[in-house]
């Protein structure tokens, strides 16, 4: 009889098994910069910024929608910050 690890019990083992981590935060930032430095990457980033950072909701927007959009904005801002860090070396 085999015993399961905590990861297997939680059902997340499929997700964690293939996960690879850069050795440093600097390397991760450089990965972001390389990923979004191509013309396609720049278009994708511009699209993400357009649908999140450049989007305004009206005064009748529900609380849940506001929170959802703010989470999206935070993610796009995080990606942009990582790109800047990676470009600085």
Image (cartoon, rainbow, N blue to C red):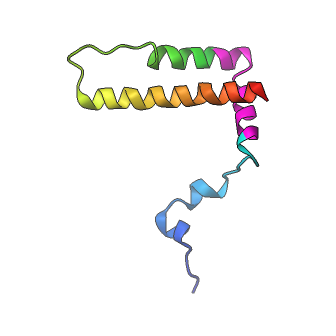
Which quadrant would residue 27 be assigned to in this image? top right
Q: Residue at x 70, y 34 (%)?
A: 29
Q: Residue at x 66, y 16 (%)?
A: 42
Is 50 situated above or below 10? above
- In the rendered image, residue 50, in percent from the top left (x then y), is placed at 49, 13
Residue 79 in picture, x, y percent from top left:
59, 29
- Left or right placement of residue 65 versus residue 41 in this view: left
Q: In the visual, does 84 lie left or right of 59?
A: right
Q: In the displayed structure, would residue 33 be above or below residue 5?
A: above
Residue 58 vertical placement versus 11 (above, below) = above
Which residue sits at x=53%, y=26%? 76
Q: Nearer the viewer, residue 79 or 16?
A: 79
Question: Residue 14's x, y, as percent?
Answer: 58, 57
Nearest the viewer among 3 and 29 is 29
Q: Main secondary structure of the magenta part?
A: helix
Q: Does residue 33 belong to the magenta stretch?
A: yes
Coordinates of residue 68 in the picture (x, y in percent):
36, 31
Residue at the far right in the pictured view: 89
Q: Nearer the viewer, residue 61 or 7?
A: 61
Looking at the rendering, the stretch of residues picked out in magenta corresponds to: 26-42
């Amino acid at each position: 009889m085999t015993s399961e690890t905590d990861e297997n019990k939680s059902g997340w083992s499929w997700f964690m098994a293939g996960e690879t981590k850069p050795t440093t935060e600097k390397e991760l930032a450089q990965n972001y910069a390389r990923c979004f430095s191509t013309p396609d990457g720049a278009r994708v980033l511009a699209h993400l910024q357009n649908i999140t950072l450049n989007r305004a909701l009206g005064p009748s927007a529900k609380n849940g929608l506001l929170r959802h959009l703010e989470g999206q904005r935070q993610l796009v801002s995080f990606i942009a910050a990582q790109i800047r860090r990676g470009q600085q070396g």
